């Protein structure tokens, strides 16, 4: 019996080594590599139609992690003139609390809450990013599966498939499942595939450029392509700062005053 147990242990242990990192380790290393405590900058989003027409959105963006269970984000839009002065505030939670999102509309000088509980929350300012895409996943709502490692253009990746544990979780995320490619050299997400509720590929997210902000990495150019419509969005971030952002910035009062 002892010999059998030893053989089984060696088989499992050897198999783990051959297969590489565990799911938990990959997710933890990704968080350690990309979880910058405080971050702000400017971004330009280009919305590119299938015919090649381009529309631009410009905004200032702020992000701050609060403990281990909350991320706050604020977007203040400067362009086009039709959205100048519009603000978007997000509070994302990873401990079961519902996420909160507010939008300030300067035309009516009012702030209203946006519901994220259905259809992934709708699309972000007409881009190919949904509002839900802007919120980090609560991994407690997801089941992860390790897929075979991949090599693309000479870069090796760990590949994980994440699927909402319940139909409600999947509805809130807006996808049937997501396949994510983590670089083996730095654990940054280089590619993410989003599948619709027919399990067909809907969108592909790519990190086009990364900035080394030791000990962190940050994607300064992101593209999101809707492969079903041919529409594409490219997001470029500049003027990045990691200086601490006061908590008052992430309040509805501040949202309305800027």
Image: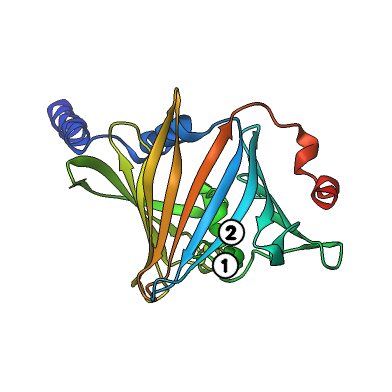
Identify the residue shown where x is 68% and y is 54%: 78
Q: Is residue 87 left or right of residue 128?
A: right
Q: Which disc, if any, is residue 57?
A: 2
Q: Is residue 210 left or right of residue 244?
A: left
Query: Helix or strand or loop: what does disc 1 sit on?
Result: loop
Identify the residue shown where x is 77% and y is 40%: 249
Total of numbered circles in the picture? 2
Q: Which disc, if any, is residue 35?
A: none
Identify the residue shown where x is 40% and y is 71%: 52
Q: Which disc, if any, is residue 123?
A: 1
Tell us which disc is closer to us: 2 or 1. Answer: 2
Q: Residues within 10 Å of mark 1 (few under 14, many from 20)?
A: some
Q: Horizontal and vertical percent for residue 247? A: 76, 35
| Among the two numbered marks 2 and 1 on one chain, the one whose residue lies closer to the N terminus | 2
Picture quarter containing residue 70? top right
Colour approach in the figure: rainbow
Q: Residues within 10 Å of mark 2 (few under 14, many from 20)?
A: many
When the figure is inspected, residue 172 is found, relative to residue 148, above or below; the finding is below
Q: Which residue is more in the foreground, 220 or 73? A: 220
Query: Helix or strand or loop: what does disc 2 sit on?
Result: strand
When the figure is inspected, residue 94 is found, relative to residue 216, above or below; the finding is below
Furthest-top residue in this view: 214
């Amino acid at each position: 019996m002892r010999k059998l147990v030893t053989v089984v242990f060696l088989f499992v242990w050897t198999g783990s080594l051959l297969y590489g990192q565990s799911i938990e380790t990959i997710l933890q290393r990704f968080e350690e590599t990309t979880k910058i405590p405080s971050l702000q900058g400017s971004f330009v989003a280009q919305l590119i139609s299938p015919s090649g027409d381009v529309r631009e959105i410009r905004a200032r963006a702020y992000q701050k992690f609060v403990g281990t269970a909350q991320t706050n984000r604020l977007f203040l839009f400067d362009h086009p003139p039709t959205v100048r002065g519009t603000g978007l505030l997000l509070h994302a939670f990873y401990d079961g609390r519902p996420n909160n999102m507010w939008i300030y509309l300067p035309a009516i000088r009012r702030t209203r809450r946006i519901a994220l509980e259905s259809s992934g929350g709708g699309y972000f300012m007409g881009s190919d990013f949904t509002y839900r895409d802007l919120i980090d996943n609560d991994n407690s709502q997801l089941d992860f599966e390790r897929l075979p490692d991949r090599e693309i253009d000479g870069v090796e990746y760990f590949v994980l498939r994440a699927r909402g544990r319940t139909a409600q979780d999947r509805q809130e995320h807006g996808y049937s499942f997501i396949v994510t490619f983590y670089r083996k050299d730095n654990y940054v997400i280089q590619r993410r595939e989003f599948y619709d509720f027919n399990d067909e590929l809907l969108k592909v997210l790519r990190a086009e450029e990364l900035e080394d902000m030791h000990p962190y990495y940050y994607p300064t150019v992101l593209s999101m392509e809707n492969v079903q419509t041919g529409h594409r969005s490219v997001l470029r971030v500049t003027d990045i700062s990691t200086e601490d952002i006061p908590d008052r910035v992430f309040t509805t009062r501040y949202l309305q005053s800027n």
